[in-house]
Image (cartoon, rainbow, N blue to C red):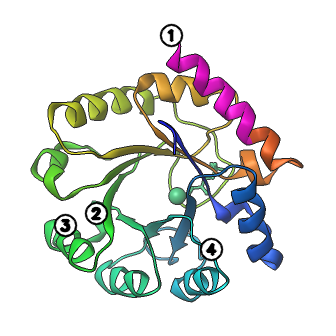
């Protein structure tokens, strides 16, 4: 895996042939599968759950599965996703009464833990939790739907979190989720992100490999700056 990670969000894929979509996007060069879990409670939409993750693993998917929980409460879903082969499990701090305990649970179950921050959420809590994190996710749209417009305020927050990660010695991915495409991925990377979720930009295109390679070409430019 290179310095940058591209994580297509299967929320924007064709669910009628999900297995084929996942296979297609992985052979097109994706690094992670971003797996959005919505409960019609924490967010106003309903998506897929642990049984679907299990089915992907059983069908032979070995790539990291990056589970983004948009559910409340979180602990039972953490257990269920750890059981069916999730690699990363991230949740929104507002959705857990005991954030540190939920992160410990993820770690104890052998998964990598992440926290997700909405566009309107502060990140103060992070400095107390860095030791438990393998990923920090900054939402660049309000959670619930694919295909929304990137909120540019997020760029400032990416800078802040990049600085925070760099003050420590732990390897923590900085993922940005929402409204990312070929046209803005370089800007998001320049602000300090290393992991990019893209739903509609990839699955809404006819040629996944071409979009992913255009994204990588944009990222190359950032490296050489
Ligand atoms: C939104 C999800 C995102 C979404 C991204 O709640 O967390 O992962 O699928 O989709 P795009 O890239 O289309 O904004
Ligand atoms: Zn997501």
Name the front one of labels 2 and 3: 3
Q: Which residue matches tag 3? A: 99
Is tag 4's residue or tag 1's residue first in the polypeptide sequence? Answer: 4
Marks 4/1: CA–CA distance: 35 Å
Q: Is residue 83 visible?
A: yes
Marks 1/3: CA–CA distance: 38 Å
Is tag 2's residue or tag 3's residue first in the polypeptide sequence? Answer: 2
Picture layout, residue 148 above or below residue 51: above
140 sits to left or right of 167: right
Which residue is found at the position 28% from the left and 63% from the top?
94
Q: Which residue matches tag 2? A: 94
Q: Which residue matches tag 4? A: 61
The label number, if any, that marks residue 225 in the structure image = 1
Picture layout, residue 55 above or below residue 215: below
Marks 1/2: CA–CA distance: 37 Å
The secondary structure type at the circle numbered 2 is helix
């Amino acid at each position: 895996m290179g310095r940058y990670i591209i994580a297509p969000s299967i929320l924007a894929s064709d669910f009628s042939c999900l297995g084929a979509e996942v296979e297609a996007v992985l052979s097109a060069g994706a690094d992670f599968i971003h797996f959005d879990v919505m409960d019609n409670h924490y967010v106003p939409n309903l998506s897929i759950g642990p049984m679907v993750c299990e089915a992907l693993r059983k069908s032979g998917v070995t790539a990291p599965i990056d589970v983004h929980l948009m559910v409340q409460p979180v602990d039972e879903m953490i257990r269920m996703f750890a059981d069916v082969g999730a690699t990363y499990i991230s949740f929104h701090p507002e959705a857990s009464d005991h954030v540190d305990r939920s992160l410990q649970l993820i770690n104890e179950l052998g998964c990598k833990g992440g926290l997700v921050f909405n566009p309107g959420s502060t990140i103060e809590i992070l400095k107390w939790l860095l030791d438990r994190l393998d990923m920090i996710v900054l939402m660049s749209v309000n959670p619930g739907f694919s295909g929304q417009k990137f909120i540019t305020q997020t760029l400032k927050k990416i800078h802040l979190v990049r600085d925070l990660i760099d003050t420590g010695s732990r390897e923590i991915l900085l993922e940005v989720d929402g409204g990312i495409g070929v046209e803005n991925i370089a800007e998001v990377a320049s602000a300090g992100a290393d992991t990019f979720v893209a739903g509609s930009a990839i699955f809404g295109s006819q040629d996944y490999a071409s979009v992913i390679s255009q994204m990588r070409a944009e990222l190359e430019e950032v490296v050489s700056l």
